Image: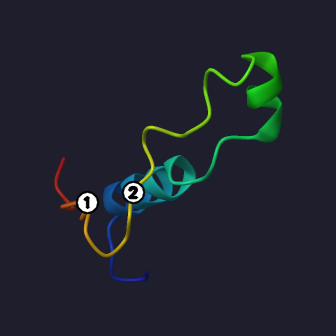
Amino acid sequence: MGKKGLNKKKRLAKAIRKNKRMPPFIFLKTNRRVTTNRYRREWRTDKLHITDEE
C-alpha cells in the first residue's frame, strides 16, 4: 500500500467497509424486510475500477 496515493486508499477502505454483511439487529428492527446488503460485491467478478486521480 505504500505506493498507492491517499485518494485511492480512501476509496479502497470505503469499499472494504461497504462489503460487509448486514448486522443482525437490522433483521429485528425491520421485521426481516431488510435481509441483505445491496452494496455487497464479489471479489472475483465485480471489479472496482478505482484510479488514483482526483
Label 2 near label 1: C-beta < 8 Å?
yes
Q: Residues within 10 Å of mark 2 (few under 14, many from 20)?
A: some
Give residue 19's mark. none
Q: Which residue is more in the foreground, 35 or 17?
A: 35
Q: Is residue 18 left or right of residue 23?
A: left
Of marks 1 and 2, which one's residue comes earlier in the chain? 2
In the image, is residue 31 above or below residue 2? above
Q: Residues within 10 Å of mark 1 (few under 14, many from 20)?
A: few
Q: Of discs 1 and 2, which sits in the foreground?
A: 2
Number of marks drawn: 2
Q: Quadrant of residue 12?
A: bottom left
Extreme-bottom residue of the structure: 2
Residue type beneath disc 1: Leu
In the image, is residue 27 above or below residue 13? above
**x, y percent for residue 24:** 80, 39
Extreme-top residue of the structure: 30
Quadrant showing the N terminus: bottom left
Which residue does the image show at 37% across and 71% down from the upper left? 43
Q: Quadrant of residue 29?
A: top right
**x, y percent for residue 9:** 41, 63
Which residue does the image show at 16% across and 55% down from the upper left? 53
User: To which residue does mark 1 refer?
Assistant: 48
Q: Is residue 49 left or right of residue 5?
A: left
User: To which residue does mark 2 refer?
Assistant: 41
In three-dimensional space, the C-alpha distance between marks 1 and 2, rounded to whole angstroms, equals 9 Å
Residue type beneath disc 2: Arg
**x, y percent for residue 35:** 62, 34
Q: Is residue 38 left or right of residue 3?
A: right
As helix, strand or loop, the secondary structure at mark 1 comes to loop
